[in-house]
Amino acid sequence: MDIKNIFENNRKWVETKLGLDPNYFKQLSEGQSPEILYIGCSDSRVTAEDLMGIQPGEAFVHRNIANMVPNTDLNVMSVIEYAVRYLKVNHIVVCGHYYCGGVKAAMQSADLGILNPWLRNIRDVYRIHQQELDSISNEEDRYKRLVELNVQEQCVNVIKTAVVQREYRDRDLMVHGWVFDVHSGKLIDLKIDFPKLLKHIMEIYHLD
Ligand code: CO
C-alpha cells in the first residue's frame, strides 16, 4: 500500500458509486439514520462495514483498542448517548476479535505507559472470571475465551448506562456481543441473553 495511491483510489471509488447511482452522494449528504451502533477494536484487520457487508449510512461506528466501554471514557460514553438518544439505533453491537493484541498485551507483565489504565479494564475482566479462565490449560484457548468474556463485560458496561436503560424501557433496543475470527473471517454471535442480563444488572445498577 502506497499512501500516494489513496487519492487515486478515492477518485475511482467516487466514480464507481456514481456509476451505480448518480444521486449516491447527494442522498448521503441528506443525513443518517443508522440502525446499528457498532463498537469494535481499532485493529486494522477488523473492519466494521466490510465484515458486516453493509454500506455507508447503515452503522454508527466507534472503535478503540480492545473494544472497551469504560464508564469514565467520555468518547465511548458520548458515542452511546448520541447513537441511542438522538440517532435512535435499535441495535448496539460490541464486537471483539480473536488474536486481539490489546487483550494479549493486558495479560503481560509489562509497563505500557498510558496504555496501563486502558488495559487495566481487561485485567478486571480476567479477575471477575479468573476461575473459569485459569481452568483452561491451552494458552490460545484461554486468550480466546478472555476475548469473549471481555465482549460480554463490555456489553454489561453498555447496559449500565442510563440512556440504554431508559430507551430500552420505551422502545425496541437490543445489545449484542459478537466476536470476529480473524483466522476464518467468520463473525460469531455470543448469543448474550440481553433481557436477562439487563434485569440482573439493573438490580444493582438501576439508574432510570
Ligand atoms: Co483488538
Image (spheres, grey):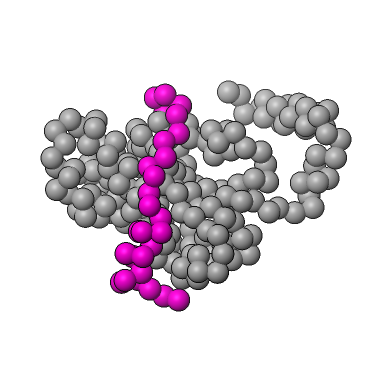
Q: Nearer the viewer, residue 48 or 8?
A: 48
Q: Is residue 14 left or right of residue 56?
A: right
Looking at the image, residue 48 lies above or below residue 8: below
Q: What is the magenta range?
A: 182-208
Residue 74: percent from left, percent from top: 48, 64
Tell me, yes or no, if residue 51 can be seen here.
yes
> Percent from the top left, x then y, of residue 129?
21, 50
**Residue 49: x %, y % from top left:** 58, 38
Q: Image height check: is 207 above or below 14?
A: below
Residue lying at 41% horizontally and 62% vertically, measured from the top left: 159
Residue at 45% over, 76% down:
208
114, 43: nearer the viewer: 43
Q: Quadrant of residue 108?
A: top left
Q: Residue furthest right?
A: 22
Res. 15 image quadrant: top right
Q: Residue at x 30, y 46 (%)?
A: 149
How many marks are shown on the rendered structure? 0
Q: Quadrant of the N terminus?
A: top right
Q: Pinpoint residue 48: horizontal percent, then vertical percent.
A: 54, 39
In the image: residue 119, left or right of residue 90: left
As for residue 110 lying within the magenta part, the answer is no
Q: Is residue 64 left or right of residue 54?
A: left
Instruction: Tell me if I can see residue 113 in this picture.
Output: no
**Does 184 appear in magenta?**
yes
* Lateral position of residue 90 relative to residue 55, left or right: left
